[in-house]
Amino acid sequence: MADKQQEHERKVQEHQLQYNKYQELLTDLQNQLSALSSQIQEHSVVDKTLTQIPPEKREGRKCYKMIGGVLVDKTVDEVLLILNQEQKELVKSKESLMKELEKVKQELNEWMTKNKVKIVRK
């Protein structure tokens, strides 16, 4: 009888640990998505601001871009090209993270169903 109780307690602890791992992973992915969304928004604001400058006034105009912690002197058109490429990469990364987040949610739901885990909040 005591062995059954201990086995049950061990299983409960294992399930709790696995559930906590899933929750940590989901939180981490959501934080990464939030950071990427912020970066995309920042790139969008800078892009919008720079594209409002008429092309004839952009020529020869200096612009500074932070690259690897170093401020680099560029032209407005060079920065616009860099921003555009970075924004595309950020959007791809965000889409990839969103797919991964959905996959992990699906795995969690399947794991919960398979192990008959129910969330009890006190």
Image (cartoon, rainbow, N blue to C red):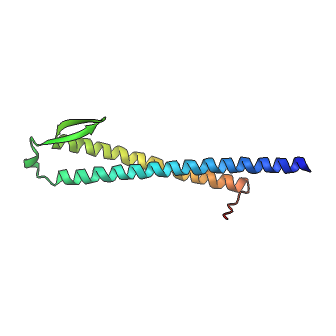
The residue that appears at 66% across and 47% down in the rendered structure is: 18
The residue that appears at 55% across and 51% down in the rendered structure is: 26
- State whether residue 98 appears in this view: no
Q: Is residue 88 left or right of residue 73?
A: right
Q: Is residue 8 left or right of residue 115?
A: right
The residue that appears at 59% across and 51% down in the rendered structure is: 23
The residue that appears at 63% across and 52% down in the rendered structure is: 108
- Residue 114, percent from left and from top: 72, 53
- State whether residue 46 appears in this view: yes
- Residue 110, percent from left and from top: 66, 53
Decide which of 59, 19 is in the foreground and name it: 19
In the picture, the quarter occupied by the C terminus is bottom right
Decide which of 46, 54 is in the foreground and name it: 46
- Residue 38, percent from left and from top: 36, 52
- Residue 36, percent from left and from top: 39, 49
Q: Is residue 53 left or right of residue 105?
A: left
